[in-house]
Amino acid sequence: TDHYKMWNEFKTSKGGTVEGSYNKVISNALDLHLAGGESGRAPYYAVFVSFEVKEAFLAEFHQIMAVDATETRKEQGCLHFDLLQVAGSDTKFCLYEVYKNESAAKEHATTDHYKMWNEFKTSKGGTVEGSYNKVIATSMDFHG
């Protein structure tokens, strides 16, 4: 499409992105769900996390994330919560979370279901060391 060609030209031949900073992740959506919320309100507070789970911990990870995803989507400040599995990998995952604002994201970090996930990745050592990468972003509104 024309808009993709424009983007591709910008990032390649025009040098519009910093060399080495462009990282494309292809994934399979495990469970896409829009948790609800207000429409037309921007900017939202978004979190994108990528990580690898140790193979021996995969069953426990799935159990924890089933609870975390379900309960996070019930939070008043959560607009979107996706768990994505990187295509071609059984152990690499991404979380895409969108909250109404930073306060809602901070409130999420105080919940029991988040604490369960946090304990899994830290004190239990369920993720591969050095694989955890978190990006905080705000949305850009191009809807006019």
Image (cartoon, rainbow, N blue to C red):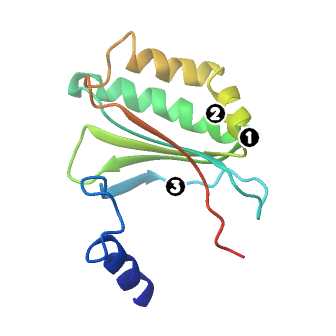
Mark 1 Cα shell of 10 Å, populated few (<14), some (14-19), many (≥20): many
Residue 12: horizontal and vertical position, in percent? 27, 73
Seen at 32% across and 15% down, the residue is 125
Does label 2 or label 1 sit earlier along the sequence?
A: 2
Q: Which of 52 and 102 is in front in this view?
A: 102
User: What is the three-letter code of the residue carrying label 1?
Assistant: Gly
**Amino acid on which disc 3 is placed:** Leu
Residue 73, position as x, y percentages in the image = 65, 41
Residue at which label 1 appears: 77
Q: Residue 33's x, y, as percent?
A: 58, 54
Give me the residue at 60% from left, 37% from top. Answer: 70
**Of 13 and 134, the residue lying toward us:** 13
In the image, residue 125 sits, relative to residue 45, either above or below, namely: above
Question: How far is mark 1 from mark 3, CA to CA?
Answer: 17 Å
Q: Is mark 2 on a helix, strand or loop?
A: helix
Q: Nearer the viewer, mark 1 or mark 3?
A: 1
Q: Which amino acid does label 2 sit on?
A: Glu
- For numbered disc 3, what is the local secondary structure? loop
Q: Which mark is residue 19?
A: none
Q: Which element type, helix, strand or loop, lies under badge 1?
A: loop
Q: Which residue is identified by label 2? A: 71
Sort mark 2 into few (<14), some (14-19) or many (20+) by Cα contacts within 10 Å.
some
